Image (cartoon, rainbow, N blue to C red):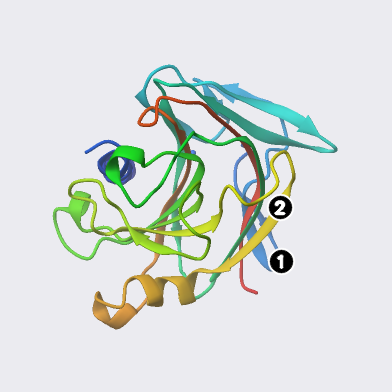
Amino acid sequence: MKHMKSFLVFSCIITAALVLSGAGMAAVSAGLTVAGFDSGEMKRGAPSGWELVKKDGTPNLTLEKKEAKYVLHMKSDSRSSFGIQKDLDLGTEKYPFLSWEWKVTRLPRGADVRAAATDDQAIQIYVAFEPTARPAKFNTPVIGYIWGGECPKDTFVTSSQPFAGKVRYVVLRNKEDVLDTWYSEKRNMEEDYRKMFHDIDDGQPRDIKGISFYINSQKTKSEAESYIYNVRFSRE
């Protein structure tokens, strides 16, 4: 029951941000891979071990072979917004870094996270942290690492969606980056948390409670397409 409540809370948080959980985790010596996608197995529309979350339209996602691994491939159209999510329970002090590989082959036309009417992205990575108060739906800090469109890179933005003031983004890539090209990323979540949530307990990082990947292009009535894999929490 505790697990189900946690899952429902995390789902509500991302719904609020967007609208108004691969293979299982693989522990390694210095980190934890949460989306290694060692197989192409899908269950109930999502990679094994993940939950499909449908916001609008029809989800279009598959696992495709890349060398010895599989990558998550997502495509959205003018009506769709969806993603996958996984519950976690990790200490940020033990796993302060998040790394991954991603590429985008199509950006939503005119997308800009700074305005609710154009808040579409080809790919978003959300990390949800322990709620600061009840109700958890409105009091859970969430960091979103996004591949934006018009918004300049390295911009820190608070969600423009209603009741989502604790969902905060950093734009890592945008329309200036080359499409159909793989990029490797690594972020220090402790540092990002302190910058983005300095107004909550003086920016003291909280435990990690979930991760999700999303795509949407319904607000701009356009299309988007992206790929992601090798998502990993680590100590250094």
In the displayed orientation, state which residue is furthest to the top: 58
Percent position (x, y) of residue 94?
53, 73
Q: Is residue 89 visible?
A: yes
The mark found on residue 207 in the picture is none
Q: Can residue 1 be seen here?
A: no
Q: Distance from label 2 to label 1 (Cα)? A: 24 Å
Give the label, 2 or 1, closer to the camera. Answer: 2
Q: Residue at x 74, y 44 (%)?
A: 181
The amino acid type, in three-letter code, at marker 2 is Tyr
- The amino acid type, in three-letter code, at marker 1 is Ser
Hey, which residue is sitting farthest bottom in the picture? 202
Q: Identify the residue at the far right of this view.
A: 67
Rendered residue at 21%/49% (across/down):
137
Q: Residues within 10 Å of mark 2 (few under 14, many from 20)?
A: some
Quadrant (top left/top right/bottom left/bottom right) for the C terminus: bottom right
Residue 85, image quadrant: top left
- Mark 1 falls on what kind of element? loop
The label number, if any, that marks residue 29 in the structure image: 1
Q: Which residue is mark 2?
A: 183
- Mark 2 vs 1, N-terminal side: 1
How many numbered marks have been drawn onto this rendered protein structure? 2
Q: Is residue 183 left or right of residue 173?
A: right
Q: Dot 1: few (<14), some (14–19), or many (≥20) neighbours within 10 Å?
A: few
Whole-percent x and y of residue 80?
A: 41, 23
